[in-house]
Amino acid sequence: MLKHLAAAATFAAIFAAPAQAQNYPSRTITMVVPFAAGGPTDTVSRLVAESMSKDLGQQIIIENVGGAGGTLGAGRVAKADPDGYTLLLHHIGMATSAVLYRKLPYDTLNAFEYVGLVTEVPMTLVARANFEPTDLKSLIAYAKANKDQVTYANAGIGAASHLCGMLFMSKIETPLTTVPYKGTGPAMTDLVGGQVDVMCDQTTNTTNQIKSGKIKAYATTSKERLAALPDVPTAAEAGLPGFEVGIWHGVYAPKGTSSEIVQKLSASLQKALKDPAVVKRFADLGTTPSSDAEATPEGLKTKLTSEIDRWSPVIKAAGVYAD
Ligand code: MLT
């Protein structure tokens, strides 16, 4: 009897999967953002989710799960049902955390299905508006003269803001005092309020604040000046060549999510990245959408694996890790 039941269950599972994919999505999807609301990852996610919702005909709600540099949110999705109704939008931190954390709540290369790349966002080194140094050179001199008195906001070990800060400190061979937040959304509130001195954050979070004069920018980490911030020099122009980093973002689903559902999500993501409203908002915020070829499972998998290889020696040389 049990044998027959097992066979029936397997038969049902085999024939249920395509039906699931055919009817997918039939209810609200949750997109986990592994940082607090109001930050750059949240901004990118809401723009993409809104456009994908229209295409898929179902709402995509954002769930902010901040903490531990994005690893708590990624862990939440790794453990979710592989039914296509829980997704993760995360960035370079998926690669750097794989090297930085001695113990992660997920297996980076085996706990997820890849949907596709979303965008690669430049960073800006910014400061509270009344901070004494007026340019990058005087900031470096000030940091050296005041040892670790300069406070530096980030979103925890593994965050893009952490990586950028680590690169900056190693480039200038001077430590800063790190102030961690659950995301650079809340960190920006303190920077604008003058409670923290400097931060390296993505243009998706800093462009409007720079333009309004609420914070000041010393440099971008891009190779060329940004059309959205034409008056901000690149780090190379400002006297710190080689200080370049771009924060790529990808969409993931739990391992075991059917390939039909993954392909449907990737197709919808590609459409969202060509949505004129998304393209314009990205441009206003200093970034551009990934191409169709990048917004695929293969595109994201290639990026993630190559970035783990790229950052491993850099992070190990910096001697930074988290338990
Ligand atoms: C970071 O890695 O710094 C995050 O992008 C911050 C955020 O999105 O809140």
Image (tube, helix red, strand yellow):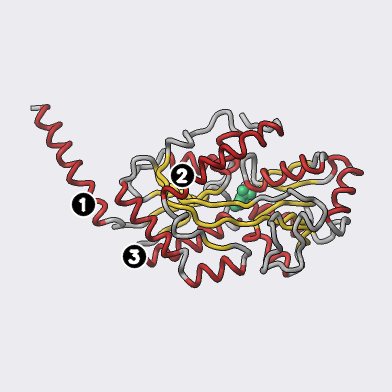
Q: Which residue is mark 3?
A: 57
Does residue 78 appear in this view? yes
Q: Residues within 10 Å of mark 3 (few under 14, many from 20)?
A: few
Residue 211 locus on image (x, y percent): 72, 69
Q: Report the quarter where the N terminus lies.
A: top left
Residue 66 locus on image (x, y percent): 56, 46
* Along the viewing direction, whichever of 191 and 225 lies nearer the viewer: 225
Q: Which residue is mark 2?
A: 301
Q: Residues within 10 Å of mark 2 (few under 14, many from 20)?
A: many
Tell me which amino acid carries mark 1.
Ala
Q: Earlier in the sequence, mark 2 or mark 1?
A: 1
Q: Which residue is mark 1?
A: 19
Vertical placement of residue 71 versus 194, above or below? above
Residue 150 locus on image (x, y percent): 83, 46
Does residue 196 appear in this view? no
The residue shown at (50%, 71%) is 277
Circle 1 sits in a helix, a strand or a loop, which is it? helix
* Along the viewing direction, whichever of 130 and 219 lies nearer the viewer: 219
